[in-house]
Amino acid sequence: MLFFRSATTLAFFATAAVNVVDADANSDVEEPVKALKTLCYDYSELPSVDLGPDECTVRKFNKITKDLFAMARAENPGVQCKGGVKNERMAMTGTLTQKDAENVFKEMCKLQLSEAAKELEAIDQVITGVDLDEFYAGSGFLNNETGNFQQDPESFLKMGGYNKYNVISDDPRTNDHYPTTERSYDAGQAVKALYSESTKNYFAAPTSEFEEGCASNTVMCCWNRDRQYFDKQGNCKSGDCARQDPGDNTDLCWTEDKETDEVYPWPGDKTEGDLHCHGISWGEDDESGLDINSMAKWNSLFYVSMYDHMYDRGYVGSITIDSEIAGSHPMCGCIEEMAPVARADCNQVSGGANYKLSIEDDILKVEKVEGTFELEFEACEGFKFIEDFTPDDFENAEEKKELKSSNNDLAAFVFKQYLKGKISSTQVSLVEETLIGYRNPDVNNSDKNREEACAGAFEKKFEGRPYEERVVSDVVGGSISA
């Protein structure tokens, strides 16, 4: 017989939104309450099962219970089990259907992951010799110098070997062209070490400006330069890296010079060149441990800005560091502070832990393994924008069928956050003012679509002004200087 043996267990199954027997969850008496199904076999002598970070899934649950059922049946050849393994799954989860049993298992995994996520503590980001305020503004030696943070000797061999280079090494300080300075090299090594820490601890906000948070719950970085070669990213080459562009994934729509109150449209890429933008977004803070992406937002910013784009790809410098582009915007900042662009790529953070599955007192039990939780960085998963689609529509299972996935797209992720109630319509409006293609997923398809979106947004905001590039002859690119 399956019994719910404690108020805690009863409360859990009640929150799992499945068919279970109603009981007094406040009762202190641990007398058994009869469940709806009974187990055919005794599983108490069977071993527990270890689950890896990616194995607390319905598919794994069904396979494990199938294997355990086969073992129990082999040990009890004379016992017939009406309903087979599905009966056992329902009995050990206190449910009436296979689907509900699977839902209970998913909730168990979700609950244990959230508990594991709470194990991490916030630590400060410290990189000796680096002023993070300066870095995120887009200035300082990390943004101004040229040279690699890391490299593979195989890259030299593929590009001519000793016929072309005197030194072939994994040490970027010894290069023939653009040798890396000691301070850049040391900072790169520190970033590499900090990346390892970023998967095992929550990071505090990197600067006082970010400590204040963002009204939009969204940060975006935009880079105008590639300082590193041999990484198959951007246009920097070993013999030509003085002013090379990053990989192009967006269009700059316009900038505004607050000092002169002038507006500068940037159609095409004659002046701006290739630009690259990448962002993060998060929900409101809570202590449930369920929204790992929000809890790890500053880890995500570190990964996007310092590890993935600077250390790995060599992307540095803010858009308005360029003396030909008017205005003053940081390299990374709250999206409401950034210059309007067509689109941006996107990062999110998830988490994983090891688990132990067992059947005790006829009840399925899933427990996290202490000390195994780690954060994982990945391209965000969002939904393609649909006009007038609301959070209420999202709650309707049938309405969800209208949604199409759109990954690695900041606009699509913000739209998903909004539908799930993690950010408000007011915050979405702030994002929309900068991310011009928010309502137009076609900006992901081509440069032509991006330019059209920028032109349309400019003409709507600055009615009567032509969307034509203005020559900047007397404006030095922003107040941020090298």
Image: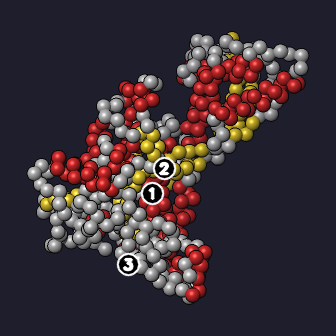
**SS at mark 2 in the image:** strand
Question: Residue sitting at 51 percent across and 38 percent down?
Answer: 289
Residue in front for this viewpoint, 108 or 338: 338
- Residue 439 visible? The answer is yes
Whether pointer 1 and pointer 3 mark residues with C-beta atoms closer than 8 Å, the reply is no
Residue 344, percent from left and from top: 37, 53
Residue in front for this viewpoint, 272 or 18: 272
Q: Earlier in the sequence, mark 2 or mark 3?
A: 3
Residue carrying label 3: 242
Q: Which circle marks residue 318 in the picture?
A: none
Mark 2, Cα crowd under 10 Å, few <14 / some 14-19 / many 20+, is some
Image position of 422 with respect to 74: above or below: below
Closer to us: mark 1 or mark 2?
Answer: 2
Mark 3, Cα crowd under 10 Å, few <14 / some 14-19 / many 20+, is some
Q: Amino acid at mark 3?
A: Ala
- Residue 142 visible? The answer is no
Residue carrying label 1: 304
